Image: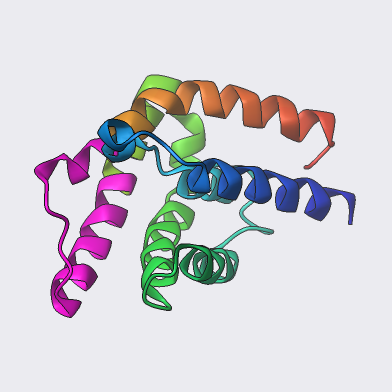
Amino acid sequence: MHSWFAIIISFLIALVLALLPMPDWTIWLRPAWVLMVLIYWAVTVPDRVGVGTAWVVGLVVDLLNGTLLGEHALAFTIVIYFVSRMHMRLRMYPLLQQGLSILFFVFLYQFILYCIQGFIGSLPESHLYWLSSVTSMLLWPWLFVLMRDFRRWFKVA
């Protein structure tokens, strides 16, 4: 029970970071906070955080953002499926290589959202849309260290 509390707290913090207002010129630089926290937990405790958790968290993100219901849920679920398939390899990678994996996973997430938004006719107006994957990659080492310390402090194993 104690470990679920820590996981839920980390998702709540990620949701707050994802919803914080930003200046218009930095909106495209917002990292995929919720997805990165999902990836972290799916790699470190895959028996507790997996595809089902990704679906529920995605629905929460859809409700909070006011987007098409299931859009983020589908994207999170597909990405976390691939993460869970290779979580043992991802654990072994050094942080820089994990960062490159994060670049790929966030890009895949954005591509899925881009396809869904294209299908419903609301594509992003700028090519800067893809910058979020780069900022997520650059922030991954710091987020990983913070999450690792958070996990140890709450004794999530």
Task: Tell me, yes or no, if residue 145 can be seen here.
Answer: yes
The magenta region covers 106-132
Image quadrant where residue 57 sits:
bottom right
> Is 20 contained in the magenta span?
no
User: Is 96 positioned to the left or the right of 63 in the image?
Assistant: left
Q: Residue at x 68, y 44 (%)?
A: 10
Name the spot of residue 109 as percent of width and height, x first: 31, 55
The correct choice, above or below, for 118 with respect to 33 in the image is: below
Residue farthest toward the front in the current orientation of the protein: 23
Observer able to see residue 94 = no
Who's the residue at 54% across and 40% down the image?
17
Q: Main secondary structure of the magenta part?
A: helix
Residue drawn at (21%, 57%) of the image? 111
**Quadrant location of the C terminus in the rendered image:** top right
> Residue 16 versus residue 54: which sits nearer the camera?
16
Residue with the most extreme right position: 1
